[in-house]
Image (spheres, rainbow, N blue to C red):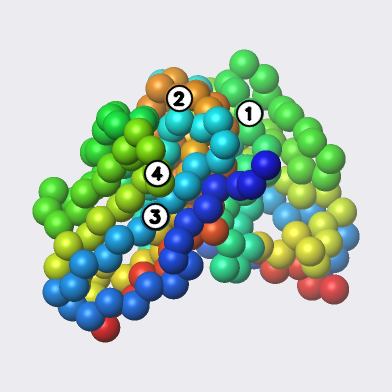
Amino acid sequence: NAGVMQNPRHLVRRRGQEARLRCSPMKGHSHVYWYRQLPEEGLKFMVYLQKENIIDESGMPKERFSAEFPKEGPSILRIQQVVRGDSAAYFCASSPGAQDTQYFGPGTRLTVL
Amino acid sequence: QQQVKQSPQSLIVQKGGIPIINCAYENTAFDYFPWYQQFPGKGPALLIAIRPDVSEKKEGRFTISFNKSAKQFSLHIMDSQPGDSATYFCAASKTDDKIIFGKGTRLHILP
């Protein structure tokens, strides 16, 4: 049973470009969470999704950031018009149910030049 | 407002020693307290978790102590090994809500 998969592992973008981060949850998991981790910081919750629904997006910046988890395919975190401050590690986690243990992927390290 | 405060930021312990990492929380509605271990370049992995109906939980060399009245909990690593060197995060959540993480403790075990 493969774990949570994220790609790409490393992503470099210039200011103003778009970044798309993908997350494939563990088999049988229908709940996906996105977190951002800055150097020397803990993980900050961004958004929680179930298939085709956003359950909690209270940690998402109001502009430029969006997330989806379609019926088929991976969850996507999209950052439009990236700025240097978006440089961070973005982690995805999945769980089979809302109160179950979250399993984390290896992360995508985004660098904005 | 930091809902989960973790200390120390970094910790160096001799092999065989017992590192202790402390966390304090604000919200009395929290009912789930996990600890995650993260190695460089990897995602966090659940290490051990506790609910407030018990004061201690032990899994192998890892023990969580929980003090509900003080709103504090801590992680103890018995007989620590160099392979335990990692960043440890405490966290807290309430039912059906997101997990709030502490800022992490970088632990280094000297050989």
SS state under label 1 = strand
Residue A97 left/right relative to B107: left
Which label's residue is closer to the chain start, 3 or 4? Answer: 3
- For disc 1, the chain is B
For residue A43, side relative to residue A63 (left or right): right
Residue at numbered disc 1: B50
What residue lies at 40% left-to-right and 44% top-to-bottom?
A73
Residue B101 visible to an observer of this rendering: yes
Asked if labels 1 and 4 share a chain, the reply is: no
Q: Amino acid at mark 4?
A: Gly
Which-is-in-front pick, marks 3 and 4? 4
Determine the residue positioned at 63% across, 33% down.
B49
- State the SS at label 2: loop
- Expressed as whole percent of the image width and height from the top left, the position of residue B103 reads 46, 55
Position of B9 compared to A88: left or right? right
Q: Amino acid at mark 3?
A: Arg
Q: Callout 2: residue from which chain?
A: A
Question: Local crowd at mark 2 within 10 Å, few (<14), some, or many (≥20)?
Answer: some
Mark 3 crowdedness (10 Å alpha carbons): few <14, some 14-19, many ≥20: many
- Which chain is disc 3 placed on? A
Q: Looking at the rendering, in which quadrant would you find the C terminus of chain A?
A: bottom left
| Secondary structure state at the residue bearing disc 4 | loop
